[in-house]
Image (cartoon, rainbow, N blue to C red):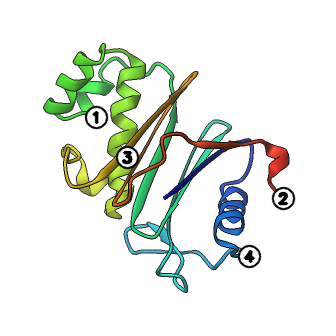
Amino acid sequence: MKLFGARSCPWQALLAYVLKAEYGLSPLPEIARTPQGKPHFPDRPDLHFSVSHTGDLVLCAVSACPVGTDIETIRPRRDSLPRYALTEEEQRGWQALGGDWPAFYTLWTRKEAWCKYTGQGLRALWGQTPPKEGLCWGQYAGDGWRAAVCGQEQPPETICWLEKGDLP
């Protein structure tokens, strides 16, 4: 699995960069969506990807197996959001992590990454907690953001961050 992040770039540019740099694949293959909305390469079933963006941050995961990723900017929201968005089990985890917004986004990005991994989307899996076993997880944190990746392959320990000038 490859995991790359960048600031202030279109997600397609980051995906094209990763495919060329890591797989020698250029130009970017045609992208289609499943009926549930998950993007994929119809002509390259051997490659799976997931992209997420928030503010000026973009995160891209590419794998030989299904993969999902999410990145979120930490910002205060309605006080009731954690009770609405997290299952009871996740709420206990949120409290154990400190019950603050960074803790919420740590759990939320995990849930979103899992929903993207399954291809079913958040609406179909609302009210469910991601499994603790059977999948490979990566959790990442930076100043003002949280991110997660979910898949069948062991994720990298860190995100490979690119500068805008690195991208075509």
Residue drawn at (73%, 59%) of the image: 13
Report the mark closest to the observer, 2 or 1: 2
Give the left or right position of residue 8, taking residue 139 as reference.
right
User: What amino acid is labelled 3 in the image?
Assistant: Glu
Labels 4 and 3 touching (C-beta < 8 A): no
Rendered position, 10 above or below 146: below
Q: Disc 4 to disc 3, how far (Cα)?
A: 29 Å
**Residue 111 occupies quadrant:** top left
Q: CA distance from mark 2 to mark 1?
A: 38 Å
Q: CA distance from mark 2 to mark 3?
A: 29 Å
Q: Quadrant of the C terminus?
A: bottom right
- Look at 40% across and 39% down and name the residue there: 109
Q: Which residue is mark 1?
A: 85
Amino acid on which disc 2 is placed: Pro
Say if mark 1 contacts mark 4, CB within 8 Å. Answer: no
Please tell me in which quadrant of the rendered image residue 162 appears.
Answer: top right
Percent position of residue 122, x then y: 33, 51
Q: Are marks 2 and 1 in contact (CB under 8 Å)?
A: no
Tag on residue 168? 2
Three-letter amino acid code at disc 4?
Answer: Ser
Q: Earlier in the sequence, mark 1 or mark 4?
A: 4
Please report contact status of discs 3 and 1: CB closer than 8 Å, yes or no. no
Residue under numbered circle 4? 26
